[in-house]
Amino acid sequence: MGRRCASLQQNRGVVWLAGAMPTIDIEQTRNQARALLDSRIESVTNLVKTRQRIADLREQLAEAERDDKRAYVRATKDGWSPDELKKLGLESGAAARRRKTATAKPGTDSSPSSEGGLPAAE
């Protein structure tokens, strides 16, 4: 291969021998590539964890809404009228959701589903 000059320059995994073609350091290049991939994998892992948390919270919300509906029905079976419950600030969850939807500004959607890219669970 000829004489190698003692003068070496190293830049990002490439070793330059004076007067010769560059020699690529495969291990250093692989390590740099792994570091870049690890960073990308970490960010997508965090995204998956966040999306899973959103899905879990939506399921918890759906369960809480089912419990609320059962409790409301139980209160009406125990003699509370819908008007009495409404005066106490405890109107039917369905009625409250309808009013909240009707009073929302048209053309704006501030629901978490529009921000997270996942369909709302209802």
Image (tube, rainbow, N blue to C red):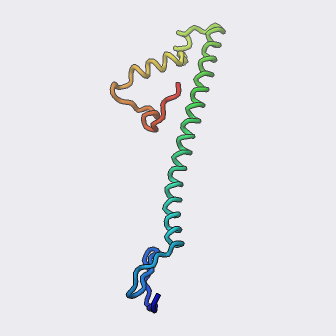
| Residue situated in front as seen by the camera: 45 or 111 | 45
- 85 relative to 31, above or below: above
The residue at 59%/36% (across/down) is: 56
Picture coordinates of residue 118 (x, y %)? 48, 34
- 6 relative to 84, above or below: below
The residue at 51%/72% (across/down) is: 26
- 58 relative to 14, above or below: above
Q: How many marks?
A: 0
Picture coordinates of residue 83 (x, y %)? 53, 9
Instruction: Please identify the quarter of the rendering in which residue 68 is found.
Output: top right
10 sits left or right of 80 in the view: left
| Residue situated in front as seen by the camera: 79 or 102 | 102
List the single residue furthest toward the front.
1
105 sits left or right of 13 in the view: left
Picture coordinates of residue 6 (x, y %)? 46, 92
List the single residue furthest toward the left.
107
The residue at 57%/26% (across/down) is: 62
The residue at 65%/13% (across/down) is: 74
Picture coordinates of residue 52 (x, y %)? 56, 40
